[in-house]
Amino acid sequence: MTVTTTDHGEPQKDPQDDGRSIEAVAGHHESREQRHFKERIAVWLFIGGDLVFLLMELFYWFYLRALNTNGMWRGAECSKANPCTDGLGNAITGEITKANPAYTLTIAGLTVLAAFLIWRVEIVARAQAKRGVISGSAALALLVLLGAVVVQCIQFGKLPFTTIDGSYASSFLYFMGSTLGHLLLLTFLTFALWNRGRLGKYDGGHWYQVRLSRIFAVWIAISTCVLALVMVVFA
Amino acid sequence: MTTTDAPPMLLEDTPLGKGAGGLYRRQNALTGLVGGVFLGFIGWVVSHRLLQGSNWGSDMVVTVTMVGWVLGFNIGMGTFNAPIRWMLGHDQSYEDELYAAGVTQGKSRYWKFCTDHKVVGTQYLILVMVLFGVGGTLAMMMRTQLITPHSSFLSANSYNAIVSIHGMVMIIATIIMVTGPFTNFIMPIMIGAKDMAFPRLNAMSFWVVVSAVPPLLATFFLGGVDAGWTTYAPLSVQAPAAMDAFSMTMIVFVISVTISGINTIVTILTMRAKGMTLGRMPIFTWASMVGAALSVYAMPALLITFTAMITDRVTGTSFFVAAQGGTGWLWENAFWIFGHPEVYIILIPPVGAMLEVASTFARKPLFGYKVTIAAFTAVAGLSVMVWAHHMFTTGWAPDLAGPFMVTTELISIPTGIIFLCIIGTIWRGSIWTRLPMFFVYLFLWDFIIGGVTGIYLSDVPADNFFHGDMFVTAHFHYTLLGGAMIAAVAGLCYWFPKISGKMLNERIGKTAFWIIAIAIQITYFGQFWEGFQGMPRRVAFYDPIFLHANQMTTVGAYFLMLGFLVLLYCLIDGWRHGKPAPANPWHAKSLEWKVPTPVPLVNFLVDPVVTTDPYGYGEPEPDNLSTDFPDPDRELVPTLSSDRPVTGGEVL
């Protein structure tokens, strides 16, 4: 390989980006746009991996539903004369009741709302709004997300089945757990957006981290809606 | 050519303030260990008290304990420092970043959360060797048990547990054996980058995988995983609490590999030197990228599989238990949706490394560069469509056996093309037969055997005959040990001078090579023999008709272990007492050989600009080029202008 070289002199920090260098060792020649590009690709790759995870979840759901082993998807064939067995070996003598769709749809709706609010944070940050506007929008998104988490916790307590009641119950609870995990991750990011916005970290056009959060939030909203749709329509 | 009078000060010599590094200053492997034990203990006590009454070894208690260990270890190591500081708005300063990169820390940085990709690569190398040591020791125990038909060396349960952990330790080790050390250490330099795209994520991926090792080894003290490395349900659902620790290991490993894969892809896509187009990238870089892409999209299948396994065992859900609405077929499908791409996650990067070796020592451009890249991509694409060939005998979807047989056989076409490209590269080359090249030859021999026997197994009728017997074991050991691992050893011998700054003693290395080369044939031909006789896998006791084949395998395995011990001695001896390595001992063309040895912290003191591909061995060299290669036994001194390290302020 033939190489030539260009002399760029001493390693430099980006003077406009005090303390935010991600290129830890080099700390040299990358502009914010270049770093944004790298991080955006990373976020999209992560979303790609998460998409595979979502597809696998759907595979689990529809495979177990279609197979309906021993009639135990929701136990429609279980009766006193022909009881099924739950995870503790107890008899199940009737169909497992479906979960109330209101909670599921509410969580999906709140997640979509949170994604829109995070999008708004990006818009105001890009418009170089005052830090109060940026952090206020992020605080609103954070509240909505916390609301979704609370509704999810309430739903856990109100379910008409437990983990041991067959494969529908198992899959439903797994979807809920997966949604909760994603919501907590987004809550972490949104808390950081609010806090950093409050501290003025997104003043003066430093909006690229907000954009990454928005991309991720939109993905979370989409995946939550897909899971909710499956849980409600294909029970 | 112009040079400045004084080279610029190296970044690693930068004086740092007392506060630089913040918490990182107080954190290392010891604090990680303390944190892990502390949170693990807290998890153990709390889960026992609150959830399970008096049962200290229940699934719930073990799971919570392992979660506590993993979190505590990583908190103690400093894995989460930067994300937490970012969330709180206290970003790390430039000095903090320099400290994290190992500046002013000397050798202690190898025990810390260090963001320098070369340190992370070296850490991975040590970890991989430790894992191979553990897996190899377990293999020796298995073979010792099998030296006689009814040996009392191990109990049946212990044997089963050892089989399972041997399998998974080796799978983990082989997945990271190239992507860990070489993709981290070498690849960024190869493409002209100063580090990986995300140095902190890079360090995180290493320490996260370290935290997965103790839970894996803890399985021996928790009743053992007696369900084989594939841990098929429902056997694994009924296994002792060790299965919870095993599942936790796999979940943590998935997280590490996914992070690492994303980092690799972003680094390659966005941090190449000026002029290094995709068409000029070294083939190892392509192989790393394809392997990383495959891992990012195969690992989530494993993640859902093991999280569902934990919920089945801990909370009583019914994914895999047929009596309650689940099915073992779901486990098998999900496991192999990950499991077959995993073979290529293991194989593609070492083959890429070996192609670098072949081109360098044949002094020829890589034969079929673009075809090889296409073949890598085709293998990766097809590998996600072949998983059910592992399930021909399970009764799942018999109508799909034909299509899966065809896709499996199709994958042998691009694999064969890669093989031909290796041969084409060597063909009529001016072969410089140094130690790395020996292992290339061994790869060619072993992989043809492993590959061809794989085609037998892809055929439904042959698979119905061979499934579950030692023929299959011999096939995949020829492929993974004789193929992938030997290719990785070729890469290790090739890049060792750059990594360690020392030359290997070739005489010791060649001794190791011959022992390994012969022992592989004895060991795995023995297993083919056992398979043809019909001996099943995973049995601690067997009928005396299999005695001679088993004795042959066991003797071969002892020699194999001996060969690897000699190789290990060669590496340690080279590292400690080897002759200092010049910057480019092999007169290779790619960028990693253009930087000084040892490599400076920022790799390139000046930014390289690439103007040709890395395999221009056939091109006219400068007038002062000497074509007689130095004798390996005398001190190597770089004499060629093209070999001279690029230094600061210099224009070649």
Image: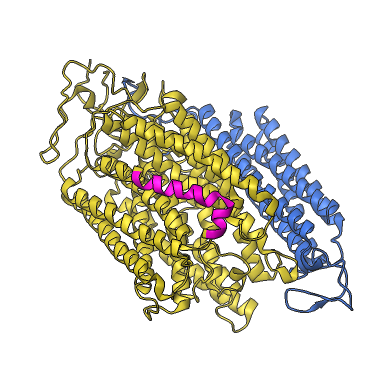
**Colour of chain B as rendered:** yellow
Prevailing secondary structure class for the magenta stretch in the rendered image: helix
Colour pattern: by chain
Front-most of residues A132 and B272: B272
- Tell me which residue sits at (41%, 59%) in the image: B528
- Tell me which residue sits at (35%, 62%) in the image: B136
* Residue B274 visible in this rendered orientation of the protein: yes
Q: Quadrant of the C terminus of chain B?
A: top left
B59 up-or-down from B594: above or below: below
Rendered image quadrant of residue A135: top right
Rendered image quadrant of residue B185: top left
Task: Specify whether A45 is left or right of A219.
Answer: left
B146 up-or-down from A47: above or below: below
The percent coordinates of residue A220 (x first, y second) are: 70, 45
Front-most of residues B388 and B568: B388
Residue B91 inside the magenta-drawn segment: no
B178 up-or-down from B158: above or below: above
Q: Which residues are magenta?
A: B445-465
Front-most of residues A234 and A47: A234
The chain coloured blue in the image? A
| Outermost residue to the bottom | B54
Q: Quadrant of the N terminus of chain B?
A: top left
Total numbered labels: 0
Task: Specify whether B511 is left or right of B321.
Answer: left
The percent coordinates of residue A130 (x first, y second) are: 67, 32
The percent coordinates of residue B441 (x first, y second) are: 30, 42
- Tell me which residue sits at (26%, 26%) in the image: B646
Task: Specify whether B641 is left or right of B292.
Answer: left
- Tell me which residue sits at (44%, 39%) in the image: B288
Residue B457 inside the magenta-drawn segment: yes
The percent coordinates of residue B76 (x first, y second) are: 45, 60
* Residue B89 visible in this rendered orientation of the protein: no
